[in-house]
Amino acid sequence: MPALRKYPSELRERAVRLVAEARKEDPELSLNAAVVRIGQRVGVNADTLRGWCKQAAIDAGERPGTTTSEAERITMQRELLDRSTWTSKAELSSAMFEWIEGFYNPTRRHTALGTLSPVEFERLHATPAAAA
């Protein structure tokens, strides 16, 4: 299960955007100076914000590294594909579908749901009539 996040994803996106805007306005501003300045303003540790900015640059193809989507594929490789063998492509497809829809999507956090997993969101918003 994914780790709980200390900061909401909206704050993360806003802080990364503010750092990028600050560096655009002042091209001589270093990443370190920008994350310290913006981090203090939005209440995020500078090291945390620096990591977010570096990951955003990787995801945008601006610097080398493992993208977020590639990390998700690596997780599936490690948790599903490396632990089993299949006799056909159909079995493999079925196992991948089951892993994605049965484990990954229900447990990963969605920004559209207020950084809750679908399971947590449904549990939080279930009505007594629907539960009966």
Image (spheres, grey):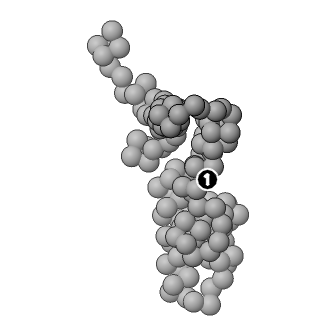
**Furthest residue in direction top, as rendered:** 132
Work out whether residue 58 or residue 20 is closer to the camera in this orientation and state it. Answer: 58
Q: Is residue 80 visible?
A: yes
Q: Quadrant of residue 39?
A: bottom right
- Residue ranking furthest to the left: 129
Numbered circles on residues, count: 1
**Residue reaching furthest front?**
87
Left or right of 64, for residue 94: left
Q: Position of residue 34 (x, y in %)?
A: 62, 76
Q: Residue at x 65, y 72 (%)?
A: 64
Above-or-below relation of 91 to 73: above
As drawn, 24 above or below 81: below
Residue 25 in the image: x percent, y percent? Answer: 50, 86
Image height of 50 relative to 25, above or below: above
Which quarter shows the N terminus?
Answer: top right
Q: Which residue: 53% across, 76% down?
A: 20
What amino acid does circle 1 point to?
Answer: Ala
Location of the C terminus by quadrant is: top left
Label 1 packing within 10 angstroms: few (<14), some (14-19), many (20+): few
Which element is circle 1 on?
Answer: helix
Point 58% across, 56% down: residue? 70
Decide if residue 38 is in sight here: no
Left/right of residue 69 with respect to residue 45 in the rendered view: left
Residue 67, placed above or below residue 113? below
Q: According to the image, label 1 marks what residue?
A: 71
Q: Residue at x 67, y 60 (%)?
A: 48
The spot of residue 103 in percent (x, y) is 53, 32
